Amino acid sequence: MKITSEEIQLTKECLAMATEEGAEKARVTLNKSVMDLFSTLNGEIDKVSHCLDRSLTLNLFVDGRYATFSTNRLSRESLRAFVAKAVDASKMLARDPLRKLPDPSRCEKNAVSGDELGLLDPSYDEVTSEKRRSTALEASGFGRNVSGLISEEGEYSDSLYDTLVVDTQGLYCRHTETSFEYGVEVTIQDEEGNRHSGFWWDASSRLSGLKASECFDKALSRARSQIGAKPFRNGKFKMVVDTECASRLLTPVLNALGGGALQQHNSFLVDSLGQKVFSDGMTVIDKARSVGETGSRLFDSEGVATVETPVIENGVVKEYFINTYMSGKMNLEPTVEDVTRPAVERWISPSLGGKEGRLDASALMELLGEGIYVTGFNGGNSNSSTGDFSFGIEGYVFKDGKIGPAVHEMLMTGNFITLWNNLLAAGDDCRLCLSKLTPSLAFKDVDFSA
Amino acid sequence: MINSKQYYLDTFGVTEEQLRRLAAEGLRGGGDFSDLFFENSSFTDLLLRDGEVTSGGFHEDYGVGIRVLKGEKTGYAYSEATDETSMMSAARAASAIADGTASCGDSVAKLIRDAKDRAASYVPCENNGGRPVRKFFLGAPNPAADRYPVLQDWRTAKTAELSAYLMKIQEAVSKRDSRIVKIIAVLSTQTTDCLMYNSFGELKYDTRPLASLALSLIFKQGDKTENKSVSRSYRMGVEMLTDELVQQIADLAVEGIDQRFEAKRPKGGQMPVVMAAGASGILLHEAMGHAFEADFNRKGQSIFSEKMGSRICAEGISIVDDATIPGGRGSLNFDDEGVPGQRTYMVEDGILTSYLHDRISAKFYGVTPTGNGRRESFRYNPIPRMRSTYMEGGNADPEGIISSVKKGLYVDQFANGQVKIGEGDFTFYVKSGYLIENGRLTQPVKDVNVIGNGPEALAGIVAVGNDPKVDEGSWTCGKEQSVPVSCGIPTVLVKNLTVGGE
């Protein structure tokens, strides 16, 4: 179900159609994906789904103008009419001299087969419906007569994504990957009749790497951990954030480094390039090209080659994400358009002393002694212009390095710049199935209210 | 907008006999029910940034989804082509959910007849508050009852005219406040032809317009920066783009910006919260509406699972999910299972009276589907979803509600929220509001959260204003799939919620 040679030919023909219709330059992206899904409800198959998608996106540069179009009607005849209509429509927009294709020297040259990063499971085509069904059923824990269990919803899916990007400057980039996922949500009722739910999931680019059978117990444990949860008192506390949810605190910082936000002054990191903004201990590397690792990509949507580079190093902002268009608008050197696979590096504040071995949430709680251990966020948002945030949290109080009572109906508020300046430690326990490698983190002086 | 039946058959290149064969093919594995959802969507978008409309385009999406039900189990597949071979292949894939009890040699007529016989057990009793249960929804769509008649189809709109409209908005808004440093205006339109057929023999068709106008502004005052976003969205054609709308959205975009610059985070804690009429209805949608969706209840996950017929809030409070508002973003002539769009009371005078049903949950509960079976596109099977969800007006004067609060929070804009369906716990982000001190609005506040529990908050409503209002912004609900919705509420007072602050 990968992109076929005929589809590759059709994609290239689209470029020719565009120039024949009057476009000066063009880029065509063909996305193809296939997904099979088996979901269960209370230990029985509840839904079976088979999905096959193809879509073609056309970026046109016509008479100094730029527009984007897409279609999933991919017969030659349909495409010919589509491209002609698209070229005509482009002419109705205002001219924009800053719109251009990226310099070919910046583009990826070695993404030809699509599997250069080793993210394609060669056994994908051998996965049968029966295997999918049995994986979904075997992962279910509903038949175990778990006390208080009301419902269990599980979902196994596998998919193959194939992307091809070509342009009129000779760009040819392809990325192919498979993904195998299982997730389960359990709902339990406690002795007082209150309901609690817990979710856990796992994913891998290889079926052999999927740990579906571990998910039920983890989801159940997360549901049970909320029994008896109560709000804790207001105040400033030390905080440990579990790796499972820590990316919620990193993503807004990375978004603020994007050219679109910076150019529109809708970023709290305007004029921060090269400046020390965060704690010495905050180092984020874009590990974009790691072979075999989920989230790796050799090129961005323009075909520009990704680079393994520091984004923030010892608190200093080292990288803005500036695509070709924003480069012209902001008069800055272009980079990749977005961070690909950010990884927060391990660090411990000198004030905490050293720590040998694995640095996970438990180790961080031992280091900090007491505070609040956040295991999930429930709602909240941040102000992209100021960096102020407020999030609902769930988790536990910890004391003497040990987990104590569960808390709920609590909020944490603050500002991202202040928060990351109060970083006490960054662990090394990232889940490799996530595309953002954010380990468990520890901060001081975080405002909580209940 | 409803065109002729032939228009839709021609759009998808199918015949009624072919639809019958496909529905029967889906049943060949022994399914109880099968249906087809054909979709041809045209999208356009135009973006004004840095003073000019320099970006835009159009997008096409076409295909058919085929669903087979066996009890409450679902088989689903779709095809992006509507030739016989592709559609038959999808029908066979969807039929895999069934257990193979039908014979491969059964005729189309027998498969359909058997499915109708099985459907007889589809409607066991009258137990939806005594209302009669309706079995089928036969009969052609009625253009006279159309909830979104269109004067000019977006597919015929000229890009130059739409660009000029965005420029008009820019001109109107930039005159209103000298602190504006950046303006982004986006016009997004969608026109969807859809045709639905099922093994009961029901054939429905509809053309759904949807357009959204969004404006994002960045303001600078000294060294402070603030942003503000507003939107308007309707199921209307090009006639939506009036001069009145230009002025309305420009006014909304700058409204309250002085207070935004003055706003602070309040001291956190538990306090009474007054929610302003209109967009605060997002709290109703998230914290209560989802828990009324029947799939969560059928699976025992909702906190309202065993509360049907019980009092869940004070007398005088009624909550509605409505597909009938003319031109409303959440309105539908038919849902995505061919069930007529309607107005459904979930709570009447404080009593929980109905969940929101698709065909699966309606069968499970033995009630009539409420027209809430919705999907993002032909790529998804329908599930119970809200449409326009709002609380009806009460008898309190909004000013009186505020003046009754000694110390509390007045919220006039929520940005977003999240709820845990099982527990009912919610968190909502307050984009703007005021402290209430001694019955008066005082210090503007921003960027805080309100946290609570849905059923407790509902039970904690102690005053409902006489100013019901459905917000006309571009609300999109993201439960597994994205669908357009609306929300609304009168001014209400919740006696106690947790507010996060400094």
Image (cartoon, rainbow, N blue to C red):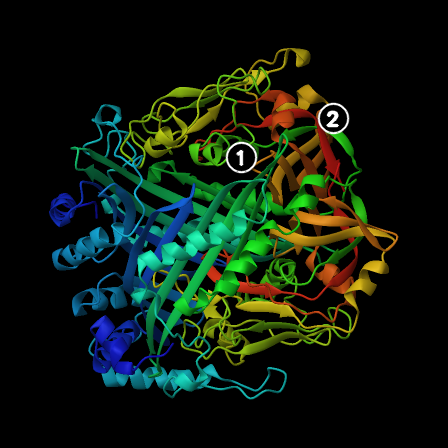
The answer to whether any part of residue A15 appears in the image is yes
**Foreground residue, B248 or B475?**
B248
Question: Which label belongs to residue A370?
Answer: 2
> Contact (CB < 8 A) between labels 2 and 1?
no
> In the drawing, does residue B89 fall left or right of residue A261?
left
Number of numbered discs present?
Answer: 2
The answer to whether any part of residue B475 appears in the image is no
Nearer the observer: mark 2 or 1; the answer is 1
- Few, some or many C-alpha atoms within 10 Å of disc 2 (few <14, some 14-19, many ≥20)? many
Residue beneath label 1, please?
Answer: A252
Give, as a three-letter code, the residue at label 2. Glu
Numbered disc 2: what chain?
A
> In the drawing, does residue B357 fall left or right of residue B457?
left
For the point 46% across and 50% down, the residue is B185
Residue B312 placement (x, y as % from top left): 73, 69
**Foreground residue, A345 or B4?**
B4
Numbered disc 1: what chain?
A
> In the drawing, does residue B77 fall left or right of residue B276?
left
Q: Is residue B405 above or below residue B121?
A: above
Give, as a three-letter code, the residue at label 1. Pro
Residue B250 placement (x, y as % from top left): 55, 54
Q: Is residue B101 above or below residue A162?
A: below
- Few, some or many C-alpha atoms within 10 Å of disc 1 (few <14, some 14-19, many ≥20)? some
Residue B84 placement (x, y as % from top left): 18, 70
